[in-house]
Amino acid sequence: QKEVEQNSGPLSVPEGAIASLNCTYSDRVSQSFFWYRQYSGKSPELIMSIYSNGDKEDGRFTAQLNKASQYVSLLIRDSQPSDSATYLCAVNIDRTGGGNKLTFGTGTQLKVEL
Amino acid sequence: DGGITQSPKYLFRKEGQNVTLSCEQNLNHDAMYWYRQDPGQGLRLIYYSQIVNDFQKGDIAEGYSVSREKKESFPLTVTSAQKNPTAFYLCASADRGRRTDTQYFGPGTRLTVL
């Protein structure tokens, strides 16, 4: 079982719709969760971080965390063609005590169609 | 401008050569990281450093070396021992504050072995 799992997609949604991206993780003690957006050929950019159960909203983006189910999601409202990118889920999984290491999923490709 | 810079943007290497990738940050971050990304893959951690003059191996350190002589600099050397070095290399940094694991990425270096 991978430590951080995402559906690779592509996930296609029409412009203006809600895109829902999902991520599951294996380590119950994980405390920090991140969503990054990566355009083709570019480096990842941080969209959201979430640390507590529940929802966290920032503009058109909402991150949802359920630690009991080991599940974190990202909702994008009013999807735009500029949202077309790969979305990476990252989780702080620290088994060695070294601290502050992130484990990344392989990403979900989102395509927003006109 | 505050940020993370990586150079060069593109690098071509002949087999058997060592090459060094530069990563500099002026964010005053204590922690720095090197990742490798292969097509269609997530990010894999090569090395990381939590503080000057100290660094730890990540998941795929074989064939790579690093140094951390200054807080703002964390160069990565890809040695001839790395069997498949062609990849997109990403440097990141993070602040050691209350939330110490929010990582921000540089623009990346694309390395191709000829």
Image (cartoon, grey):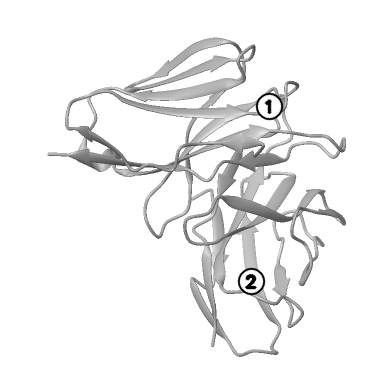
- Disc 2 to disc 1, C-alpha distance: 28 Å
Kind of residue at badge 2: Leu
Kind of residue at badge 1: Arg
Percent position of residue A77, x then y: 28, 22
Up/down of A19 relative to B36, above or below: above
Residue lying farthest left?
Answer: A114
Label 1, secondary structure: give it. loop
Which residue is labeled 2 in the image? Answer: B21
One can see residue A36 in this view: yes
Q: Which mark is residue B22?
A: none
Percent position of residue A114, x then y: 12, 39
Dot 2, crowdedness within 10 Å: few (<14), some or many (≥20)?
Answer: many
Residue lying farthest front?
Answer: A1
**In the image, what residue occupies the spot 63% across and 15% down?**
A67
Which residue is labeled 1 in the image? Answer: B99
Chain of the residue where label 1 is placed in the rendered structure: B
A40 or B67, which is in the foreground?
A40
Classify residue A7 as left or right of residue A92.
left
Up/down of B69 relative to A3, above or below: below
Classify residue A29 as left or right of residue B109.
right
**In the image, what residue occupies the spot 75% across and 22% down?**
A29
Residue B89, picture quadrant: bottom right
**In the image, what residue occupies the spot 74% across and 37% down?**
A100
A63 or A19, which is in the foreground?
A19
